[in-house]
Image: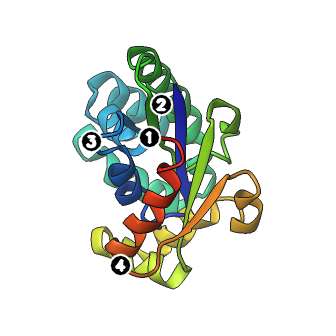
Amino acid sequence: MIKIGITGSLASGKTTASKYLSSKRGPLFSADVAVKELYQDKRFRSLISKKFKIKNSSKIKESIKKLILIKKSNISKLEKLIHPLVRKKMKKFTIKNRRKKMLFYEIPLLVESKLMRFFNIIIFIKSRKKLRLKRFKINSDDKKLFNLLDSKQMNVRKKIKFCDYVVVNEKNLKILKKKLSTIIAKYE
């Protein structure tokens, strides 16, 4: 089994790259999807509500965003709750798919979380900050939140040192797919 980690900066195109790489090649674990699933879980929402003293758990994500913007240390507090649960889901995914030839993992904070040893190959998706902000604004028009979340990530130059491949994603989808195909062809 080959475990391929896909990481990169905020709004760099990790999801697009991950979906393309895993398509018809193997199952994909997405840390972002795992987090979304956690927010659907009643027990998790209850835990977050208690920990952050949020009264309305139906709008928990909006409340968390506000708390993060007010106090940066709330991100670390949130990560301490979320990361172990996401790792548990990742472990279950790996066990469930252990007979597959290739497994793909989209993990934004792969290097920051020191998960490098779990992967045979790590691909870093890279884009200029200006372009990433433009992409981020499609889903959230909050520049302050983008800058705060982006600042939580390790410096790109340092992060790249832990990766086997760097794919610059600043053109179009056709070019991105071509670059990714060249990499994955070595392992198929």
**Number of the label disc, if any, that sits on residue 86:** 2
Question: Residue 134: x percent and y percent?
Answer: 39, 81
Three-letter amino acid code at disc 3? Asn
**Quadrant location of residue 96?**
top left
Point out the tag, 1 or 4, that comes first from the N-terminus.
Answer: 1
Point out the tag, 3 or 2, that comes first from the N-terminus.
Answer: 3
Q: Name the residue located 22 percent from the left edge and 41 percent from the top edge.
A: 58
Secondary structure beneath disc 3?
Answer: loop
**Quadrant location of residue 148?**
bottom right
Question: Residue 75: x percent and y percent?
Answer: 56, 49
Q: Name the residue located 28 percent from the left edge and 41 percent from the top edge.
A: 24
Q: Closer to the observer: label 1 or label 4?
A: 4
Q: Which residue is mark 1?
A: 31
Point out the tag, 2 or 1, that comes first from the N-terminus.
Answer: 1
Three-letter amino acid code at disc 1? Ala
Point out the tag, 4 or 3, that comes first from the N-terminus.
Answer: 3
Point out the tag, 1 or 3, that comes first from the N-terminus.
Answer: 1
Three-letter amino acid code at disc 4? Asn
Q: Which residue is mark 3?
A: 56
Camera-side residue: 103 or 49?
103
Q: Which residue is mark 4?
A: 172
Camera-side residue: 9 or 21?
21
Q: CA distance from mark 1 to mark 4?
A: 25 Å
Indicate left or right for 80 with 42 as reference: right
